[in-house]
Image: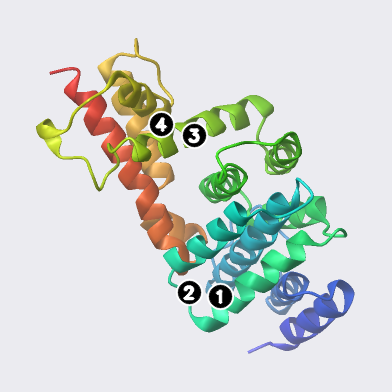
């Protein structure tokens, strides 16, 4: 078994970057060398070691960019700190993983944090796994909107993040609308945990939010609504995301997203009866 490429890659990656992300990336490149392969970044390789490297990159990049987004306005607010802490709680991280998440968050807050380079590396490791990049971007939007507002500096960071991950400004705006609607949907008592079939009280505002969560309009046909619903469920399916490189610790977050999509669809489906 060849290991020297991984060992040297890890050491050189850490020496050059002075952070865990660079070390992990170096180890992954070393692994590619050990296997005698070219540096193919299209994400088609499916080795177990590749999956581990991808999961580590997703985890560390998520929290480092989260810190950068939180710092965008100049000072991290209590809302953003609370969101990051609550997100770590929700993931039920071990003490070791929580420490890694906190270290990444602190690195993201530094003035010299290389956002574009981190995103470029992350996209390469993700390859053609569009669903992973989508969930990553959605998490960053939630951080920016954690205080109920979206500052111009936060919006700039989100647009940079979206651009480097392959999303247009229009796609980002659509995602923003969907996530803001999702937050309002849950606050209004129609989220998955509160939804109770025919006994749920449907308000016009909640129905509007449900349509926005699915990314469709009120005049959309039942067939198109179902199509949008199935696409979103497929994109956010926890098992599929895990298989594509989502860290297992983040599975509950993916489940929560699918629950919101399901609740929104159930509410809309009632209108066609």
Q: Residue at x 68, y 76 (%)?
A: 35
For this rendering, which residue is in front, 200 or 242? 200
Whole-angstrom CA distance, mark 1 to mark 4, is 30 Å
Position of 130 relative to 214 (above/below): below
Q: Residues within 10 Å of mark 2 (few under 14, many from 20)?
A: some
| 1 and 4 marks in contact (CB < 8 Å) | no
Q: Residues within 10 Å of mark 4 (few under 14, many from 20)?
A: many
Q: Residues within 10 Å of mark 1 (few under 14, many from 20)?
A: some
| 2 and 4 marks in contact (CB < 8 Å) | no
Q: Which x, y percent locates residue 234?
A: 38, 43
Q: Which residue is the site of mark 3?
A: 180
Q: Which residue is the site of mark 4?
A: 213
Q: Which residue is the site of mark 2?
A: 93
Marks 2 and 4, the one that precedes in the sequence: 2
| Residue at disc 3, secondary structure | helix
Q: Residue at x 49, y 62 (%)?
A: 86
Position of 272 relative to 179 (above/below): above
Q: Which residue is the site of mark 1?
A: 98
Q: The N terminus lies in which quarter of the figure?
A: bottom right
Q: Which x, y percent locates residue 199?
A: 11, 33
Q: Is residue 180 left or right of residue 101?
A: left
Q: Residue at x 73, y 70 (%)?
A: 21
Marks 4 and 3, the one that precedes in the sequence: 3
| 2 and 1 marks in contact (CB < 8 Å) | yes
Q: Is residue 57 left or right of residue 193?
A: right
For this rendering, which residue is in front, 87 or 1? 87
| Residue at disc 4, secondary structure | helix
């Amino acid at each position: 078994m060849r290991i020297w490429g991984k060992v040297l890659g890890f050491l050189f990656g850490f020496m050059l970057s002075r952070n865990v992300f660079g070390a992990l990336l170096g180890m992954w490149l070393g692994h590619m060398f050990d296997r005698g392969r070219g540096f193919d970044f299209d994400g088609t390789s499916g080795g177990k070691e590749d999956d581990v490297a991808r999961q580590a990159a997703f985890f560390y990049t998520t929290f480092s960019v989260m810190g950068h987004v939180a710092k965008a306005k100049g000072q991290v607010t209590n809302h953003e700190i609370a969101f990051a802490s609550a997100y770590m709680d929700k993931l039920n991280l071990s003490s070791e993983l929580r420490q890694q998440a906190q270290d990444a968050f602190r690195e993201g807050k530094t003035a010299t944090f290389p956002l574009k380079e981190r995103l470029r590396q992350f996209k390469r490791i993700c390859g053609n796994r569009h669903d992973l990049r989508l969930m990553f971007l959605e998490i960053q939007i939630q951080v920016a909107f954690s205080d109920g507002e979206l500052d111009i500096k936060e919006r700039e960071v989100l647009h940079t993040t979206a651009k480097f991950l392959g999303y247009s400004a229009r796609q980002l705006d659509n995602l923003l609308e969907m996530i803001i609607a999702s937050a309002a949907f849950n606050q209004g008592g129609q989220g998955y945990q509160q939804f109770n079939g025919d006994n749920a009280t449907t308000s016009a505002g909640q129905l509007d939010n449900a349509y926005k969560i699915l990314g469709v309009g009120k005049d959309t046909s039942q067939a198109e609504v179902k199509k949008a619903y199935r696409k979103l469920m497929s994109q956010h399916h926890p098992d599929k995301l895990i298989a594509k490189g989502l860290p297992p610790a983040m599975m509950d977050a993916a489940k929560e997203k699918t629950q919101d999509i399901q609740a929104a669809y159930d509410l809309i489906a009632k209108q066609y009866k």
